[in-house]
Amino acid sequence: MEGEKSEAVRNVPGMEAEEMKDFITAILIRPGEPPKMGTQRNRLKELQDRVGGYIECVTLEPGLVVICNEEGLINDMKYCATIGGHQFFGPILIVGADGTDFTDVPEEKFAKYYKWRTP
């Protein structure tokens, strides 16, 4: 991820407002590792790179989605997590959602999902 906090990107001197919109605050969970919070470039290619392939979105609750590798299981990626009754394989991102747009993880949802730990 680009930084540990969204402010790390959003407070960069000289960065234009348009450039700041290219980043979202997300929770990254890799198999066998605790969650990490940071900024993520909000572009398809970078999201695909982060999860290791084509992305699939799974809604956890209104305004909150998991971005995962749509072929994580069939590509034999390592088990990552079970969240909301869904099993995920390979790295995942938890992000906010507003319609079809990805947004920052809502502050009120951050603690609930950031505290989660892998077995």
Image (tube, rainbow, N blue to C red):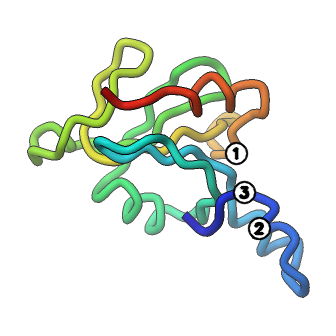
Q: Which one is nearer the viewer's eye here, 69 or 44?
A: 69
Name the residue at 30% across, 41% down: 32
Q: Position of residue 59 (x, y in %)?
A: 51, 25
Q: Position of residue 13 (x, y in %)?
A: 90, 83
Disc 2 to disc 1, how far (Cα)? 16 Å
Disc 1 to disc 3, how far (Cα)? 14 Å
Q: Quadrant of residue 57?
A: top left
Q: Amino acid at mark 3?
A: Lys
Q: Position of residue 45 (x, y in %)?
A: 44, 68
Element under label 2? helix
Q: Which mark is residue 8?
A: 2
Q: Amino acid at mark 1?
A: Thr
Tell me if residue 76 comes above or below residue 46 in the rendering.
above
Disc 1 designates what residue? 103
Q: Which one is nearer the viewer's eye here, 97 or 95?
A: 95
Disc 2 to disc 3, how far (Cα)? 6 Å
Tell me if residue 53 comes above or below residue 75 in the rendering.
below
Name the residue at 58% across, 33% down: 114
Q: Quadrant of residue 65?
A: top right
Q: Do tag 2 and tag 3 residues touch (Cβ < 8 Å)?
A: yes
Give the mark, 2 or 1, whose residue is nearer the N terminus. 2
Q: Is the C terminus in the top left, top right, bottom left or bottom right quadrant?
A: top left
Disc 3 designates what residue? 5
